[in-house]
């Protein structure tokens, strides 16, 4: 789906965000642990020295990124955004909905981030210093794919942006993630990918951004309180079973 949206916040975000964290903490590529296919490609690896997409890495997934680039053209700012978001039929209107219907719940602090493509979808891969509140994996690396990107190519800008209100994440921020489906296994760990409805984000200055459905009932809650409430709900669910 492609839609129009204001891009000012995106344009301002990228210079500051790109300088935060060590690029070495986000690999050029990550492979699906079970199929071996390329799952993640950093922007620097996906675009060659002439600014062209490396078709050998994208395969059939290149069409979405290329269409997005051509629509934006050589404009300085993004006008069109592309990429599907994870969808499901589970309720997400309350904290109890999120905590009890999520397959995996993770609380993490952002350590590094890098723009690129997740199965051909533009966005940013975020490395987390994570605490798994459920389904603790054996591997240690935890990433979040966040659909915010502004990637220049010879064919135009490739852009992504979350639906609804958001604050661009930065190193040091904390995120509470409710993964409704399964996390994607990669060779070094797991990658989470959720919609904006399933993330609680504590940004700089400890401001907490809640999904719209949760905002009215949790206006006075801080991140630590929401994390404790989530743990309590997870325990209650476990006790019932």
Image (spheres, helix red, strand yellow):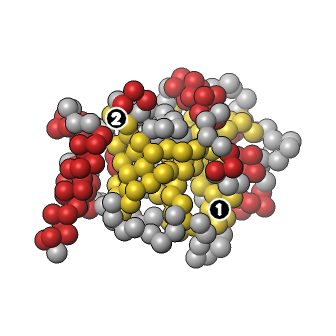
- Up the image or down, 102 lies above or below 172; here it is below
Residue 33 in view here: yes
User: Would residue 34 be found to the left or right of residue 202 on screen?
Assistant: right
Dot 1, how many residues are within 10 Å of its Cα: few (below 14), some (14-19), or many (20+)? Answer: many
Residue in the image at 51% along x and 36% along y: 170
Q: CA distance from mark 2 to mark 1?
A: 30 Å
Would you name the residue on which mark 1 appears? 30
Circles 2 and 1 in contact, beta carbons < 8 Å: no
Residue 64 in view here: no
Residue in the image at 75% along x and 51% along y: 45
Q: Position of residue 164 (x, y in %)?
A: 39, 36
The disc placed on residue 209 is 2
SS type, badge 2:
strand
SS type, badge 1:
strand
107 or 28, nearer to the observer: 107
Residue 100 figure quarter: bottom left
The disc placed on residue 61 is none
Residue in the image at 20% along x and 32% along y: 220
Of the 4 image quadrants, the one containing the C terminus is bottom left
Q: Farthest left residue? A: 240
State which tag comes first along the sequence, 2 or 1: 1
């Amino acid at each position: 789906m492609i839609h129009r949206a204001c891009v000012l916040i995106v344009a301002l975000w990228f210079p500051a965000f790109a300088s935060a964290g060590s690029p070495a903490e986000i690999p050029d590529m990550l492979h699906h642990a079970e199929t071996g296919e390329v799952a993640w490609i950093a922007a620097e690896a996906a675009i060659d020295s002439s600014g062209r997409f490396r078709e050998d890495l994208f395969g059939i997934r290149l069409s979405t990124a290329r269409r997005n680039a051509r629509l934006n053209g050589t404009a300085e700012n993004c006008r069109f955004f592309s990429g599907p978001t994870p969808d499901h039929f589970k309720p997400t209107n309350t904290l109890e909905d999120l905590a009890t219907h999520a397959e995996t719940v993770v609380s993490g602090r952002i350590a590094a981030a890098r723009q690129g493509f997740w199965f051909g979808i533009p966005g940013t891969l975020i490395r987390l210093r994570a605490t798994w509140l459920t389904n603790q994996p054996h591997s240690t690396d935890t990433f979040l794919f966040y659909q915010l990107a502004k990637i220049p190519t010879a064919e135009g800008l490739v852009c992504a942006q979350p639906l609804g209100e958001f604050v661009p994440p930065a190193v040091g921020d904390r995120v509470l993630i409710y993964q409704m489906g399964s996390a994607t296994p990669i060779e070094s760990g797991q990658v989470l990918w959720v919609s904006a409805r399933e993330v609680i984000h504590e940004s700089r200055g400890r401001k907490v951004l809640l999904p719209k459905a949760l905002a009215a009932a949790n206006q006075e809650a801080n991140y630590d309180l929401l994390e404790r409430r989530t743990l309590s709900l997870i325990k209650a669910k476990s006790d019932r079973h």
